[in-house]
Image (cartoon, rainbow, N blue to C red):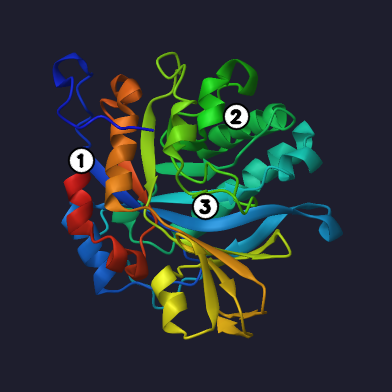
């Protein structure tokens, strides 16, 4: 796949988005914030944080949808001064809407989530009162009806002064006639996690531009305003006997080599462990294989150029980066991120 230089055919290409608003996702459940995070937001001129509050999932033993992870804020929590707006994000598993799909159940879920949101809002000063809630759910054809009904009920519970946004994957835009349009005010295109993570032969499941370009259709007819989220995270995918075992979050190829564990290099960013040992909080056995995945600045810039066909859809869009952590900013500094747009 050859990507055209930025200047090539400039006159006949759509004008690029201005990206006047650039923000980060904060996804950690255990609260921590340091100078690196503050400087990262300041370097991008960002004053808004997308704050991950909870993960909701179907809990079989309790026969309901419940939080399985919550953002734990300390009792003496004081929001960083750089924050001028907080947009809470709640992740809900797709299977939740397979199991809980009756109108009465969804109405209860919408009401409980709205109350949950208000309880969190009380922990913040009035200046940070929520103006938007984002729901992150990779819905399917089987869950479309129940998920969309939930969104309608949730929007009613939230009231007219709180916007509702949702996350989108590429296939949900290309095949919008089948997957449907969620009843929300805005959408964010998650331009990452697009490859086959569980397949050892996959080069980089986080970002696959050749695959992505095959999905860049029907954006002009998509009715919701759309923002764009790009990846700045990295991990290692650990395989055993050909099957994905777990992810080594926040770990890089350099981290692995620094351990001194005996290994065989199988190819670019791929290793076979030759001796037992600990890495990334896990015990590795001889024979385990690791594929390290990340996105370079060049790849992020190529992503924006690959998205040229849909630039007209994103003229007034916000650019988001997933996710804000000091360890990721060490690899891709915010100052350098500014160079890609």
C-alpha gap between disc 2 and disc 1: 35 Å
- Badge 2 local density, few (<14 within 10 Å), some, or many (20+)? some
Side of 7 where 309 appears, left or right: right
Q: Identify the residue at image location x=30%, y=39%.
A: 302
Q: Neighbour class for label 3 at 10 Å: few (<14), some, many (≥20)?
A: some
**Residue position for label 2:** 152
- Res 318 quadrant in image: top left
How many numbered discs, if any? 3
User: Where does label 1 land, which residue?
Assistant: 341
Instruction: Pick whichever of labels 3 and 2 is earlier in the sequence.
Output: 3
**Residue at figure coordinates x 64%, y 41% from the top left:** 110
* In contact (CB < 8 Å): disc 1 and disc 3: no
Residue 192 shows up from this direction: yes
Q: Nearer the viewer, mark 2 or mark 1?
A: 1
Q: Earlier in the sequence, mark 1 or mark 3?
A: 3
Answer above or below: position of 100 versus 178.
Answer: below
Location of residue 169 in the rendering, given as x and y in whole percent from the top left corner: 52, 35
Observer-nearest of 29 and 2: 2
- What residue sits right under mark 3 in the picture? 117
Q: From the viewer's perspective, is residue 149 above or below residue 247?
A: above
Figure quadrant of the N terminus: top left
The spot of residue 58 in percent (x, y) is: 75, 52
Q: Nearer the viewer, residue 218 or 224?
A: 218
Q: Secondary structure at mark 3?
A: helix
Q: Is residue 301 above or below residue 148?
A: below
Q: Is residue 295 above or below residue 289?
A: above
Residue 226 x %, y %: 39, 29
Q: Which mark is residue 288?
A: none
């Amino acid at each position: 796949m050859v990507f055209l230089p930025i200047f090539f055919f400039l006159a006949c290409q759509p004008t690029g988005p201005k990206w006047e608003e650039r923000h980060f996702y904060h996804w950690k459940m255990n609260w921590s914030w340091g100078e690196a995070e503050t400087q990262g937001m300041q370097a991008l001129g960002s004053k808004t944080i997308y704050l991950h509050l909870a993960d909701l999932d179907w809990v079989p033993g309790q026969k309901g949808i419940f939080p399985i992870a919550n953002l734990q804020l300390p009792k003496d929590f004081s929001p960083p001064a750089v924050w001028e707006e907080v947009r809470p994000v709640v992740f809900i598993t797709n299977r939740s809407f397979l199991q809980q799909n009756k109108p009465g159940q969804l109405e209860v879920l919408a009401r409980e989530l709205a109350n949950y949101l208000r309880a969190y809002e009380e922990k913040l000063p009035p200046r940070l009162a929520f103006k938007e809630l984002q729901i992150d759910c990779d819905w399917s054809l089987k869950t479309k009806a129940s998920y969309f009904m939930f969104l309608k009920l949730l929007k009613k519970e939230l009231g007219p002064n709180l916007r509702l946004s949702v996350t989108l994957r590429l296939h949900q835009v290309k095949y919008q006639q089948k997957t449907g349009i969620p009843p929300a005010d805005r959408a964010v295109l998650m331009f990452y996690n697009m490859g086959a993570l569980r397949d050892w032969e996959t080069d980089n499941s986080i970002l696959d531009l050749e695959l992505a370009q095959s999905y860049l259709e029907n954006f002009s007819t998509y009715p919701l305003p759309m923002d764009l989220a790009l990846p700045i995270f990295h991990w290692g995918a650990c395989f055993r006997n050909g099957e994905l075992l777990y992810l080594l979050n926040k770990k890089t190829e350099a981290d692995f080599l620094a351990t001194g564990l005996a290994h065989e290099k199988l190819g670019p960013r791929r290793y076979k462990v030759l001796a037992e040992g600990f890495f990334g909080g896990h015990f590795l056995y001889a024979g385990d294989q690791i594929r390290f995945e990340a996105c370079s600045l060049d790849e992020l810039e190529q992503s924006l150029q690959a998205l040229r066909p849909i630039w007209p859809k994103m003229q007034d869009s916000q650019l988001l980066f997933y996710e804000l952590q000091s360890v990721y900013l060490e690899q891709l500094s915010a100052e350098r991120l500014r160079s890609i747009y």
